[in-house]
Image: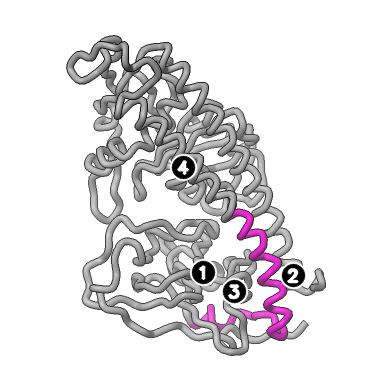
Amino acid sequence: MDYKLLSEVSVYRKDRISSDKVDKENYISTENMLPNRGGVEIATTVASAKTFPAYKKGDILLSNIRPYFKKIWYADKEGGCSNDVLVVKGNKTVDNKFLYYVLSDNNFFNYSTVTSKGTKMPRGSKNAIMKYWVPDLDLPTQRKIADILSSYDELIKENNERIELLEQAAQELYREWFVRFRFPGHENVEFENGLPETWSYVRFEKAIEIIDGDRGVNYPKQEEFYPEGDCLFLNAGNVTANGFDFSTCSYITREKDSILRKGKLQHGDVVLTTRGTVGNVAFYNEAMTFSEMRINSAMVILRNLGVVSTEYIYTVLRHEYLQKLMSLYASGSAQPQLPIKDMKRMKIVKPDAKIMDRFTEMSADIYNQISLLIMKNQTLAKQRDMLLPRLMSGKLEV
């Protein structure tokens, strides 16, 4: 197979965009680009500037800080980005989606890491990146490869849309019963101080044990993460605004897992992000097939103490009131952090046992469906990532 330099098929976009056309929805920085090819999430803040580097629909955005985090995004809109994000624009000889998959390959990220500059916070070399070899294929073949890989991404997208609808159904059930108080039998219930007389408020710390991760000297270094392994080590891309996403995973060995003291998940736990992106919540229920899982240093484990059900805890945390409260408690601008002491004093409604049991039964069915879809997505992503290098190398004909 023949190859061309990346500089022969693309350039770095140099356009600028006015700050009045950029908001949290279309601002991209290294902070809201997700690791392990996780795409992007909505920004929590927008930097102060008159103009930003621009990107257009179909461009490929790469985080140029710590390239081993594998942050890449195929733009589906236009907007602005920080100076630490590289915007790659393909020319007429290359299909942009094909080029996105070329740059999504581990070979590219390994190359970018090896040629990066600096040790504590390495930056990719813009010159070296443009010297990366791209398979020299005709446009019809490029498009066929892109179509094959995109078909997996489309299935993942469809499953994510179903997940979002199911999450909305659970939230609507919660609002109907515990915000509007139209739960079964509400017509015959007396209210006292704004709550049904048999209900009460309970502090977070009375209902939930908050468990931090291991942040000591044994915390895994970048070179100790593997694409396959014994224990899944969660990253920012795995805990999203819609719960778990296992499209891309990092693992540690059994030996490494054994020397870490805290942060090991049990089925029935809830994971909450508390640093950087604050308030993303995921539920590790029995339908999750991962037997060994750990949180990273930007998360905490919420373990049920038996006062309310875990399904209820998870649903409450996803409700807009708790989400706004956590955002309010979060401190720091560049890297927001939710202090555990503030979490402990948050209050939630504790319904009576009969209503709690009925809600748990109904929501558990929803969350089991969601977990099955999440695991399907993980399988699809794994199949796609196995195909990618074989298609790019020509080992698999199209």
Residue identified by numbered label 3: 97
Main secondary-structure element of the magenta-colored stretch: helix
Chain part drawn in magenta: 127-156
Mark 4: amino acid = Asn
Q: Residue at x 41, y 36 (%)?
A: 171
The reply to whether the C-beta atoms of the residues labelled 1 and 3 are less than 8 Å apart is yes
Q: Is residue 213 visible?
A: no
Disc 1 crowd, CA 10 A, few/some/many (<14, 14-19, 20+): many
Number of labels in the image equals: 4
Q: Quadrant of residue 172?
A: top left
Considering only order in the chain, which callout, 2 or 1, is on the residue closer to the N terminus?
1
SS for callout 1: strand
Mark 2–mark 4 Cα distance, whole angstroms, equals 33 Å
Q: CA distance from mark 3 to mark 4?
A: 32 Å
Mark 3 Cα-neighbour bin, 10 Å: few <14, some 14–19, many ≥20? many
Which callout, 1 or 3, points at the residue further toward the start of the chain?
Answer: 1
Labels 2 and 4: the sequence-earlier one: 4
Cα separation, mark 1 vs mark 4, equals 26 Å
Q: Of the residues under marks 2 and 3, which one precedes in the sequence?
A: 3
Q: Badge 2, how many Cα within 10 Å: few under 14, some, many 20+? A: some
Image depth: mark 1 or mark 4 in front? 1
- The N terminus - image quarter: bottom right
Q: Which residue is mark 1?
A: 74
Is 246 within the magenta? no
The label on residue 391 is: 2
- Residue 299: x and y in percent read 41, 40
318 shown above or below 222: above
Q: Which amino acid type is shown beneath numbered disc 1?
A: Tyr
Q: Residue 294's spot in the image, x, y percent?
A: 52, 37
Please identify the residue farthest to the left as the structure is shown. Answer: 193
Q: Secondary structure at mark 4?
A: loop
